[in-house]
Amino acid sequence: MSRIGLAAFAFIALFSGTAHADEETIQVRVQHTPEGGKKEQVEGVEITITDPSGSVVAEGVTDEKGVARLAVPSDGSFTVTIDPASLPEGLGVGEGQESRTVTVTAGLGGNANFNLGEATPKAASKLSLLPKTIFNGIRFGLVIAIMSVGLSLIYATTGLSNFAHGETVTIGAVMTGVASGWFALSGAKGGWGGFMQLSAAMIIGVGCATAFSGALELAVWRPMRRRGIGLTSMMIVSIGIAMSVRFIIQMYYGSQPRSYAQFGSQQNINFGPIGVTPRDLTTGIVALLALGAVGYLLIKTRTGKAIRAVSDNPDLASTTGINTERVILTVWLLGGALAGLGGVIFGLDEQVSWNMGTKILLLMFAAITLGGLGRPFGALVGSLAVGLFVQLWAWLFSSYTDLKTMGALLAMILVLLFRPQGILGKKERVG
Amino acid sequence: MSQTISNGLFGAIGVTAIAYCLAAIGLNVHFGYTGLLNFGQAGFALVGGYAVAMPVMNWQWSIWATIPVVIIASSIFALLLGIPTLRLRSDYLAIVTIAAAEILRLLVSTPKLVHVTGATDGINSFTNDIQNTIPGFLKGKSVPLWEKQISDYEMWVMILGWFLVVLFSVGVWSLMRSPWGRVLRSIREDEDAARSLGKNVFAYKMTSLVLGGVIGGFGGAILVIGQRNASPGSFQTQFTFLTYAIIVLGGVGKVKGPIVGAMIFWFMINVSDNLLADWTDGSGFQLPTWVMDSSNFSFFRWILVGTGLVLLVIFRPQGIFGDKREQAFDVR
């Protein structure tokens, strides 16, 4: 490239030797002043001069003094452009600064001086962002998984699609925010102090979410089951509860999204191509641990076996002496706690707002439908798929990131077309 | 006080009530008569609304020429939703319809399509044809409703809207008395029984989804014409849930249900809004500010709606005037 540029420069130099009288010269100087250092001339920068109609009238390269003298056919105004790609490593030219208009006066010529700055970090190439995207997708998937395991267990044991689950998430996040506000009054922002404060606040928030979920089971769902009210009615009741609670939160928490008081910006820790803040790393580990604990509970413990028995067949489970009502209450409490925890992590990732649970509820439903309705481990698989899909969509169609949720929902509908029982679902007649 | 009542009365017969009433008539065909759990009525309304606004703005169509577009677009949307889900259990339809409605709303909100859909601001100034056809006896006059003045445009849209409500209600009433309607109700009561009698359940469900969807599409069309603006904010998931509240209030599976439900619903919303505004405006009787103040009282109506929906479904599932014996709930 620079060889061609040099050749063009030589050609123009030659041409200027035999120029007619009304030809003018533009002197271009490219220099750079390092911070606290001496002014340096920049050699080998490719320069293009265009006339107002946009056609190229001259091309050249700066010499060892950082200067290029280029001939233009007449006086008037011209646009001088330097090619950012030809700049030496580490140097850059600001956005919109790479070209400027020069007025050439007859007999005097014109001048254009470019002062270069430090190069802004180049936008990383798309492919190099892929590992980070996948990492983010898995992390987002884990967060959705924590929230939707409860939704899936509730569906499996009671048959209810609980639309109020999103509000359980919001309550966890909002109450943590409120409690973190109380603790923040005693100082300490960021660091270990902040971490401890936020952890204490999180216990309060998750406790509130658990209490909310359990209270609903005791006050609403259990009496409704006893009265023999059907599932569709219960689903609509859950919509009504979700609506009331959502707007109670909006009334008293406000419409403005907020961050936790202990929320500070953090430096990335780099693991190869993936940079992650300590905060995101911690929440990711917490999410993994929580999911591992749930998996252990479901597979190894008596309670877990009882939960799985009730989800398979409640009548059969109760004839074998399992206290179905108690198992269902356990599921509501567990689901509430997990939803609250997911809400706190989601609130740390983004912000805490009154409708955050509603916004994520559809993705949760998409996740458990994808994984197979009523399969507890299906929720995990489906959530990872949704998380990855959302992030990969944002990566692939970077100018359509506002549609990333849409992509995940669309994928769910497509999967239902070909595999209605979901990824992990049992092959059974579902219609 | 009379101001509050007249606002409430206007709410009960106004354009919003009409639009929700039409959406509820459609949802009643799905949920009330066929037992389909359609949670995406907002999507049908959005399709109808944009089917009116987009051709007028982008291709300068006459607004009357968009009527077939509303029918065709809503039908296509119904077919797209029905094909993957109507053979599956009813909760799948619920989740797919709610997701599809949300997909459409996100799609029309995206700034990339701003020149076609107007993004979040939506489309304005597509209602000139309605304005120009206001009949002479209304033109330039405002009709008093007690203390509320109704403008000639509003009155004209209301006349058109109530005409549609009557048209569709009579249509649904006669269809549901026909053998076709009896098959729909038998599907609602026991799908397998209907199938064992040789009925093509899938085809009946699909026809029901299309019919109710088209009526819902007209609801969206009336809504955007009444607001003179088609924007995604009008068609959030909330729209569907309010429509459910309306048919539960008026009585599920009854022809008069959506009409009665929509009128009572919007009367109560408007009255409660007016009262709360009055009780938080700093003069006369005031609510304590820790309960609510002038900045947050407007959210209270939704708390009221949610709580009302819960209480109705639990304690009076047949609706206000319904008969418990023909309660059409939970029969799938």
Image: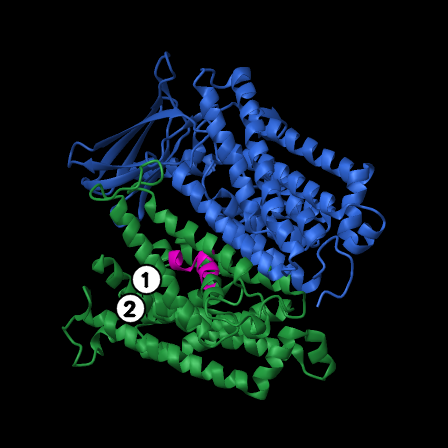
Chain colours: A blue, B green
Q: Which residue shows up at 22% across the image and 71% down it?
A: B153
Q: Residues within 10 Å of mark 2 (few under 14, many from 20)?
A: many
Q: Position of residue B82 (x, y in %)?
A: 59, 70
Which residue is disc 2 drawn over?
B126
Q: Which mark is residue A291?
A: none
Q: Are discs 1 and 2 less than 8 Å apart at CB? A: yes
Which quadrant is the C terminus of chain B positioned in? bottom right
Which residue is disc 1 drawn over?
B123
Cα distance between the residues tagged 1 and 2: 7 Å
Q: Which residue shows up at 72% across the image and 37% down it?
A: A294
Question: Quick check: A242 above or below A205?
Answer: below
Along the viewing direction, whichever of A373 and A138 lies nearer the viewer:
A373
For the residues tagged 1 and 2, is the chain the same? yes
Question: Quick check: A354 above or below A206?
Answer: below
Magenta highlight range: B232-243
- Relative to residue A249, is residue A38 drawn left or right? left
- Relative to residue A167, is residue A46 drawn left or right? left
Q: Position of residue B222 (x, y in %)?
A: 35, 70
Q: Could you tell me the amino acid type at mark 2?
A: Phe
Residue B259 showing in the rendered view: yes
Helix, strand or loop at label 1? It is: strand
Question: Quick check: A394 above or below B89?
Answer: above
Helix, strand or loop at label 2? It is: loop
Q: Position of residue B247 (x, y in %)?
A: 47, 67
The residue most toward the bottom is B179
Along the viewing direction, whichever of B233 and A136 lies nearer the viewer:
B233
Q: Subunit of mark 1? A: B
Considering the whole magenta stretch, tell me its main secondary structure: helix
Q: Which residue shows up at 34% across the image and 23% down it?
A: A31
